Image (spheres, helix red, strand yellow):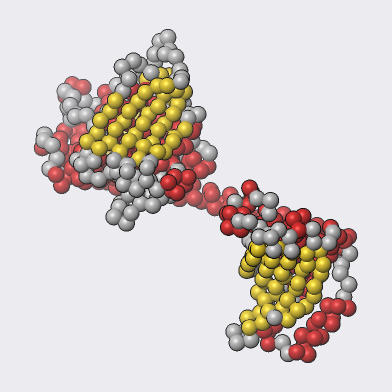
Amino acid sequence: MIPILTARIANDSDIFSGRRRARQIATMLELDDNHATRLATAVSEIARNALQHAGSGRIEFVLARLPQTNAAFLMAKVIDDGPGIKNVEQMLRSPSNSAHMGIAGSRRLVDEFVIEARPGGGTTVTLKMALAPRYARMTPNELQAFVDDLIRRHPTTLIEELEQQNREMMVTLDQLLEHQQQLREQDRRKDEFMAILAHELRNPLAAISNALNLQQHVSGKELPPEQAIIKRQTLQLRRLVDDLLEASRFTLGKLQIHRTPVRVGEIASQAVEACESIFNERSQHFHMSLPKEDLWVDADQARLSQALGNLLHNAAKFTPMGGRIHLDVWSEAGQIILSVRDNGIGIDPTSVSGLFRLFNQGNQPAALPSAGLGIGLSVAENLVRLHDGRIDVLSEGANHGSEFRITLDLIAAPVEPQKEPTVPAEPAVEAPSSASGSRILLVDDNMDAARTMAELFNLLGHETATVFDGESAIARFKQWMPEVVVLDIGLPDISGLDVAKAIRSETDTAQPMLIALTGFSHDAARKAIVDAGFDHYLVKPAMPDELLDIITRRTGASALS
């Protein structure tokens, strides 16, 4: 430990002088401009803190050498004899709430940071910057020559220091702008990756789902247990993919909701319907209590049902087999409360604050390796917040269960309620008569998905044709003139959007119904699909009843109009 220089701290001028000396010493010891500036900034911030809280202090610059390991450090110790800091750990954890923000912020600027606070006996802050290994092997004569050279040098003037800071600020600004551009490019690539990932995951899910539905229709019976498991897990995979994409939209601020007056009971029923399979799978006892009168909220029914469904799904995952789950709905003080209670593993109070952070899995035990990705609660909280509501968490701790409460503002019942139809989970599909059958062209580069869907539609009385690329789709359409075209977007040759435009340009009369069935679900894809002239838009894996319902109502209004 070789002393280099000691500087006093008694006024603002001394702070500037200490900063200039820190930069000068760092530069003489061959630290680059970036590291020299970081050290100088940290020294001045901590010196300012000493002057403000202790009235005075000193800065000791030391060369620390470890010849055995070829390690060397430049150390700057800022020492004061003030009242000290009462709670150092709290100050470092929450610097924005502390009078010592400069100290907390400085620890990110240096290679090593040590603070010693003695209540009533002052504070010592030690900053370290690593030096080149050769400084660990300096001889006594070389060290003496270095100190003599430093003493002969005068500190830079205040004007010179300000000019240096201005130059560094310009360089830093250029670096920030370049970094910002890099982040934008990475964000764009991430969006592309997420869209492609969703598409590639949904294609095989569609084929599996179609095959199971075909098998069930052919047999006319419930699926055997093994295939029922496959069907449930396929729906779970679809849910995970949807949650990942929803989380991405929230991060980018791209998710929009469309609010209308909705009955709270319909929101609750739709959420429960989506979770019944997991309750049954885990033999859990579910009970729902709804108010007798109709209560209304201003909401996007699908999105709010999704939020409540995520809470129910979360309760099922963290409640043991045979456990109890309750959904209670009531009103108080002009607000509606939707409470999801369980007797599951409970929540550690220390985990509550970060519970809704994306990918946060709290303190879930190792016995629950399949408890999820930590997305569902984040999605639910964001959806509720978009409805100007909040989610509160109640739990007495581990093994005492938990309760999640959604609170929203009530509204008066509309004069003419506009009930939006709910989508049944999976009602049985009834075959239409042959007279009502349609000519359906199925276009999908996933051959398994296209062929299984075609077989199912054939069994239900429709006439189908399948092609697997865009050019073949256009040619087959011209030859066959189908009444319905179910069209994938990501085709191997040309886009399904171009196929749709070509079909629309073929004839001005007897236009076919165009249904987009795709793995792409981001907002840009939806807009492009609307612009290309599609009548309907479904995300894979769509249930056959969804498609059949659209086809049998093909004389009605467009779902995208």
Residue ID at (22%, 44%)? 321
Q: Position of residue 493 (x, y in %)?
A: 40, 47
In the displayed structure, does residue 76 sit left or right of residue 489?
right
Residue ID at (78%, 67%)? 58
Q: Given the current orientation, which residue lies at the most extreme top position?
A: 415
Is residue 144 in view from this perspective?
yes
Q: Position of residue 90 (x, y in %)?
A: 58, 54
Residue ID at (18%, 21%)? 435
Res 7 quadrant in image: bottom right
Question: Quick one: 486 or 154, which is closer to the camera?
Answer: 154
Question: Quick one: 232 or 267, which is closer to the camera?
Answer: 267
Q: Position of residue 183 (x, y in %)?
A: 58, 52
Residue ID at (74%, 64%)? 80
Question: Quick one: 119 or 23, which is closer to the camera?
Answer: 119
Is residue 358 in view from this perspective?
no
In the displayed structure, does residue 299 sit left or right of residue 167?
left
In the displayed structure, does residue 234 sit left or right of residue 515?
left
